[in-house]
Amino acid sequence: MTASPPRVICVAGARPNYMKVKPVMDALAALGAEVILVHTGQHYDPAMNEVFFDDLRIRKPDYFLGAGPGSHASQTGRVMTAFEPLAAQVRPDVVVVVGDVNSTMACALVTAKSGALLAHVEAGLRSRDWSMPEEINRVVTDRVSDYLFAPSHDAVANLRAEGYRADQIHLAGNVMADTLLANLDRALTGDTLSRLGLEPGQYGLATLHRPANVDDPAVLADLLAALDDVACACPLVLPAHPRAAGRLRGAGRSGRVRVIPAAGYLDFIALQASARLVLTDSGGVQEETTVLGVPCLTLRENTERPVTLTEGTNRLVGRDPDRIVAAAREVLANPPAARRPALWDGRAGQRIAAALLASDAGARRRRLRPTAAPAGRGRPVHPPAAPVLGP
């Protein structure tokens, strides 16, 4: 009797997830898995959703949960209550979640309680900033995952330091790099720059969307002032992220920074690849500029992707306008050399699929779950008892 192929649910909830889940889906399907795509609808703008799916050649989702926007708690709850009956109906062998959005954590929690194995792609990233909702989502998702697919050595080190077993941790490489490298030629041969009247190497690119940067009018005003100053030396284009578009319209701008509508995936890759400099608060853009060899200044006080600082083209400059302008002038005068971390080579999805499908159904059922002690280790060693607090 021939065993049925493993059934794998891949979850996507927001635009950054699409680029991460596509190479994993393709690699799983190529190895014979039954791949089911679930779109939670956490971010769903019909026009932009269609553009990204078309650009990335992602097939129509098998299930759409329609979670929609809302507070962190209400959105997480809606995803969980919609995904739970679906998981019970589909009965997957493995659920793959990617990244760090609310849908990632919501589907991870449901999966962990369902009995299916859980794989987290982009595991081990840490900003050390507990005020970021994404940091909490990362930590919770990693804790309940059976497979932890880390994009870089620093992420592996984080997981080891937090006590995860060696059999859970896999250094897979960066799936975002897979998608970028697979689509770069298509992006560069398009008409993005000519449509916008831009010349390669003659402009800079800026993006803003983090709540810490766009929700506080004073912080946003300072950042826009810094971008205006940078634009005196290098004209800047700023595709307006849906989350920030309204706030940018309401903020006073001199007009030196050219604000354009949000770009699709191929258009945005073309804009990054031909930019002289990129200024951003996006985690994904830090990675993409490193793959492309384009100088990047990150407008945050921390990053969960330090490998882009130590082995890439990224530089952390914070939100102080003077520091941003000084760094931009320095990078424009002396751009960093292009370099790229190991395993950001376009084959991360293949490595993830191979690891997930390496075991047969019986071995998957016998796999140690996230809090189990490794074989031969016996009962876990407990630390000394905590001191008893006084009255």
Image (cartoon, rainbow, N blue to C red):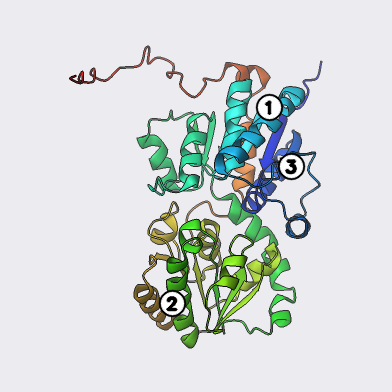
* Relative depth, front residue between 364 and 15: 15
Report which quarter residue 325 is drawn in: bottom left
Residue 201 numbered tag: none
Tell me, for residue 66, which label it has, or none. 3
On the question of residue 27 being in view, the answer is yes
Indicate which disc, 2 or 1, sits on the residue closer to the N terminus: 1
Residue annotated with mark 2: 226
> Mark 1 belongs to which amino acid?
Glu
In-image side of 228 versus 20 (left or right): left
Task: Identify the residue position indicated by label 1 in the image.
Answer: 84
Are there few (<14), some (14-19), or many (20+) residues within 10 Å of tag 1? some
Label 1 residue SS: helix
The Cα–Cα distance between marks 2 and 1, rounded to whole angstroms, is 46 Å
* In the depicted structure, whether residue 220 falls above or below residue 322: above
Image spot of residue 146 (x, y percent): 54, 28
Identified at 68% across, 85% down, the residue is: 197
* Nearer to me, 85 or 69: 69
Which residue is outermost to the bottom?
Answer: 232
Query: What amino acid is at disc 3?
Result: Gly
**Helix, strand, or loop for circle 2?**
helix
Side (left or right) of 364 relative to 311: right
Residue 315 x, y percent position in the rendering: 40, 66
Residue at the spot 75% in from the left edge and 36% down from the top edge? 35
The image quarter containing residue 353 is top right
Asked if the residue under mark 2 is in contact with the one under mark 3, i.e. CB atoms within 8 Å, the reply is no
Amino acid carrying label 2: it is Ala
Q: Secondary structure at mark 3?
A: loop
Q: Are marks 2 and 1 in contact (CB under 8 Å)?
A: no
